[in-house]
Amino acid sequence: MEKREELYSGKAKSVFKTDDADRYILVFRDDTSAFDGKKISQLDRKGAVNNQFNAFVMQKLEAAGIPTHFESLLSPCEALVKRLDMMPIECVVRNVAAGSICRRLGIEEGITLKKPTFELFLKNDDLGDPMINEYHIDAFDWADLDAVAKSRELTFAVNDVLTPWFAEHGMILVDYKLEFGVVDGKVVLGDEFTPDGCRIWDSETRAKLDKDRFRQDLGDVIESYELVGRRLGMTFEY
Ligand code: UDP
């Protein structure tokens, strides 16, 4: 697989074309950002840890029948993925209240929801990723509604796989964000699943083990990502 020109550089990953029009290379960088890019830092080992964390989770999801764009690991910080037409939408499932739902609805952090919730956000840093619903998506033609419905179904299916898995290893999957794309008419999980895009707490101590450590200046950000990964059976190469 030959790496060709850079197509796009996001806040933490870059996307490169390859000699295969249907495959891209994702490069996970050490750049870390929060608050829609307002807080930025470089964290040693982050690119390698997140790339390998993502590969492990995507393979777990594939094995459970959830289609993902992941193809193979190419190097510590690089992965080969399928080219998807991404929808500009973030799908969030919450099991426990934290983050924006607490601010928005005045809910106390840490309350376990009676059942998981599903929320949609528009990917737009300038607007602070506003919350939207299917009517907005349809009215402004941001995505196909059947594809959004499938994304919701897959986002909940991911919860059914990952929540018990984290629990078996002494962790609570509080919430997470997923992004989907379409290839050959099929909705496929894209982007990444790493501690950058979810909240993970220790089951006993409820210590935060995810990007909230960066957002809230709690320290040991990447050490916590590595701890989560090792508990789930990952080994990391740098
Ligand atoms: N999230 C993300 N990218 C975003 C917004 C949210 O990965 O642009 C993740 C976030 O890490 C958390 C979940 O989605 O795991 C829910 O985020 P929330 O709506 O609570 O927003 P936050 O308070 O994290 O900004």
Image (spheres, grey):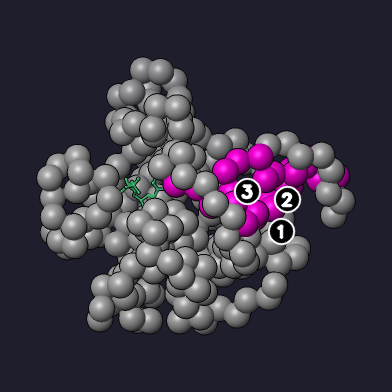
The answer to whether 195 is drawn above or below residue 233 in the figure is above
| Viewport quadrant of the C terminus | bottom right
Residue type (three-letter) at the residue carrying disc 1: Glu
Tag 2 and tag 1, C-beta contact below 8 Å: yes
| Relative image position of residue 54 (x, y in whole percent) | 56, 62
Q: Secondary structure at mark 1?
A: strand
First in residue order: circle 3 vs circle 2: 3
- The numbered dot on residue 63 is none
Give 95 or 143, whichever is nearer the viewer: 95
Residue under numbered circle 1? 78
Residue under numbered circle 2? 25
Q: Secondary structure at mark 2?
A: strand
The quadrant holding residue 104 is: top left
Tag 1 and tag 3, C-beta contact below 8 Å: no
Marks 1 and 3, how far apart in space? 10 Å
Residue drawn at (73%, 50%), measured in percent from left and top? 25
| Viewport quadrant of the N terminus | bottom right
Q: Which residues are magenta?
A: 9-34
- Answer yes or no: is residue 51 visible: no
- Is residue 32 within the magenta segment? yes
- Is residue 216 within the magenta segment? no
Q: Secondary structure at mark 3?
A: strand
The quadrant holding residue 197 is: bottom left
| Relative image position of residue 171 (x, y in whole percent) | 33, 75
| Relative image position of residue 141 (x, y in whole percent) | 44, 20
Residue type (three-letter) at the residue carrying disc 3: Lys
- Answer yes or no: is residue 43 visible: yes
- The numbered dot on residue 13 is 3
